[in-house]
Image (cartoon, coloured by chain):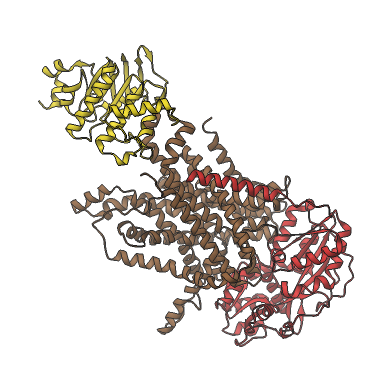
Chain colours: A yellow, B brown, C red
Amino acid sequence: MLTFDGVVLTQGTFRLQADLTVAPGITAVIGPSGGGKSTLLAAIAGFLTPVTGRILWQGDDMAGRDPGARPVVMLFQDHNLFPHLTVAQNVGLALAPRLRLSAGQGAQVATALRDVGLAGMGDRKPGALSGGQQGRAALARVLLSDRGIVLLDEAFAALGPALRSEMLVLVRDRLAASGRTVLVVTHDPADAVQFADHVVLVADGVAHPPQPTAALFADPPPALRAYLGA
Amino acid sequence: MRQLPAWGAAALVAALTLGTLLAVALRAEVGRGLSPGDWAAIRFTVLQAVASAVLSVALAVPVARALARRSFRGRGLLVMALGAPFILPVIVAVLGLLAVFGRGGLVNAGLAQIGVAPVSIYGAGGVVLAHVFFNLPLAVRLLLQGWLAIPAERFRLAAQLNAPVWRLLEVPMLARTVPGALLVVFLICLTSFAVALTLGGGPRATTVELAIWQAVRFDFDLGRAALLACVQFALCAVAALVAWRVTPVDGFGSGLDRVVARWDQRPADWLWLAGVALFLSLPLGMVLWRGVPGLLAMPGDIWVAAGWSLGVATGSTVLCLTLALTLALRGGWMASVLGVLPLAASALVMGTGLFVMLRPFANPTALALPVALVVNAVTALPFALRVLTPAVADIRASYGQMAALLGLRGAALLRVVILPRLRRPLGFAAGLTAALSIGDLGVIALFASDTVETLPLAMSRLMGAYRMDAAAGAGVLLLALAMGAFWICDRGGRMDADV
Amino acid sequence: MTMTLANVGATASIALICATAAVAQTDLPTLNVLTYDSFTTDYGPGPAIEAAFEAECACDLVFTGAGDGAALLSRLQLEDARTDADIVLGLDTNLTAAARALGLFAPHGVVADLTLPVAWDDDTFLPFDWGYLAFVALRDTAPVSSFRALADSDLQVVIQDPRSSTPGLGLLMWVHAVHGDDAPGVWADLADNIVTVTPGWTEAYNLFLAGEADAVLSYTTSPAYHLIAEGDDTKTAWAFDEGNYLQVEVAGKLAATDQPELADQFMAFMAGPAFQQVIPETNWMYPATDVPLPDGFDTLTVPAQGLLLSSEDAGALRDPLVEAWRTALSQ
């Protein structure tokens, strides 16, 4: 369980309040642009310290822990892969940040690459892959890590609808299915409806507690209605 | 704890610049304060440095603009040749300039053909001309970097809107880059010695550095030397504060071979490019033309000296890059201050101070090469820092968060992310440092013995013994080595680099 | 690639430091002579003199070069009594007053038959060569024979700065020796004949060779280099009617030397033929004692008179003369 306990985040004059608990499975984070979706994720990852309140994971306060020491993996819109490392090295970073992989770990990397449909492409550099393949390589690294929280900050926004769905299927089948807590920032309500169990609406300086997706979209509150333009 | 290496690097630089000054001041016995001549020297120094900086940067604007928006065969070569005047020993470059602009030079020969009275290069104008020759290329590089930092999309947007690129994009960029470029050129000209004097035409053209020379060498008035060196640092501090108030430090990186597609090209670009190419290549061509026959007249020792020079340059480069990387990783005020401090240091005070500091522990002559190695590294540090600091900031901006999430830190972060991503700027900075070190006579003359000599020292000794032909040959060899070292390092940084 | 370079660099630097630190080990006593740079080069007098002296002294003679003559003095002042040097060789008469004032030198004790055009009675500093300062020009340039004539002519000359160069300082003494209190006026008249003032001899001579001036301040012996080494007889030196100033290069023995006998032996050797005959064709100056001159030296211009201020006068006059010179040329 990921819990925001009376958390207040500020960035300049912007202020975001969050008091909520996220369950395992896929939770979509939606809301107007500039509403604070990325701010919320940055706080979980440890890039932003709450002004007040605590962020708890399985009951433990994560305050004071470096991003690398948190049970969090994250994908951004771009710069998810180091262009100077091979695909296998990029994926292997999840197991050995110093890039000294044992034979066993090498095999794990190969398996992860096969799982995302990149079998045999481990020796290529990211520059030699298509956008969809790059996304899958980044996902492979997330698959390999054993961290419980997965944050996708518009990670597939640059991909077309079909590719994006393909990625989200992978996320659902590989990550959510294994019991991880996945937070997906998305602009497309259709993604949320199709893949997310719950939805966190971030608007007007408040991150609202997650609602079951179907129920939320069946009867949208005013803030969501405004965002959807319905 | 993680700050420790940066503080160590800072301490080394401070010891060589301010520490040597302190050592000289403490060793001082008599002092007679500043004479009227010294004040005249300070005035002339500041005036010529301002004029040189303004002219160099003003001319650099159209040239850098033309380079930024034109793609042509030999563009890479021209950008590289831009570095040549900067690394040439002063006397060689001055002789090259005189072959073009001097009494019997090409310009006056041409004027005589059309019956126009000859023009004299000597005087304040000659000093500024020489400084522009040395620093215009540097200013072009600094500004070119600013142009290339403007994203290509902005030019497309401006072209679509039919908006004036100059006012919309280029003026704001120049407002950010010009003060930094002015500062660097001003500081280089502030401590210039031989150029100002040789072309200055008389004692009016006396610089502070010459007054220091006189105080140390003839009067042995170390107190006055220290005082004058303080004046140099004070001038540097004022200039730096003014420049930083206007804008933060800008860097110049390695990606100068990129041309952004532009829709506002003007034919005048070619005029500027041809003009600068001619202005730089004619004196260099004369250096080569006069020097190549001298290659055969060089004594065999020259090759040994060249070997020592390469050794010192290699060591300097490693040390300089280590210092620069350490400081660039820390960034902030320390990188900014150390990026200008060595520029304001008087070479003679540095050498004398080192001599005084080392004398109690060892025979300075035996330390000539290590001392040259360290001094050359510190002298080149401002340029290496300007290359590496922005590059490190870029890497942090792009990959910092991901690296943090992956738990990459310390040595692992350096090895896995930063060093590989820095290859191009590191290669460029290495080339620059090596070239500067090979061309630098610097402090070695103060320490040298007959057993070891570097190429610039061997060259100056040849000249001191009437052997001008052999010296001219050594000048060509020196230029070739410096450019070769630059090319190899720069090339090494680019090879197989994944953008 | 970068890492490989770094490794190579580190290895090279270490090798460099080791090589420098490895001082030649020998059982022979060592005589350290501090001198100027060009003395020690392969084409300078150093190697031949070293070989000749070592053949008779059973010692190791080590020349250490320290820039030019003025650098020599500042080096000595920096090192003070802690200097390793036993002998300092290469000071000139403009600098000996300051050098003597350091109180580091001992009497040389050598009685030599000197061939200087002036009397020499200094018991601390012993000359090893000398020359006349002169304007050197192309043979087909119409010569002038006085500063006044030069000032009245359209000739363009290049000179050295007296604040950074010994010939430049010598020129100041020369004009003063000839014109006394009128010297500032002469300098003012000369101003439009001076192309430029260079920091050192090297720049000035290069400018002259590059055709930037009709004449350069150098030595009457300069044409000998071109004649003998290059077979070029187009250069000549101008003798002035009132005489040409002398530059006398001297050596002195340090009182604190740990090799007093060897030092004495070297000072005596310096006045002998084995040392002196090397001088003309390596240092391109006149030898200080009577040895045969090489062919070509007979063609050199010989001024009617050699001028030389005493080292005390030269030392005392330096500051006021430099200031007057600066003022006269800054108008």
Residue B347 pos. (x, y %):
60, 55
* Residue in view at x 45 percent, y 52 percent: B490
Identify whether B379 is placed above or below A39. Answer: below
Furthest toward the left, the residue is A230
Question: In the rendered view, does C121 fall on the left or right side of C218?
Answer: right
Identify whether C13 is placed above or below A161. Answer: below
Identify whether C56 is placed above or below B316. Answer: below
Residue B422 pos. (x, y %):
43, 43
Foreground of the two, B173 or C38 = C38
Question: In the rendered view, does B83 fall on the left or right side of A166?
Answer: right
Task: Point out the image quarter for the C terminus of chain C.
Answer: bottom right
Foreground of the two, C196 or C227 = C227
Residue C87 pos. (x, y %):
80, 60
* Residue in view at x 63 percent, y 76 percent: C187
* Corner quadrant of residue C327: bottom right
Foreground of the two, B147 or B301 = B301
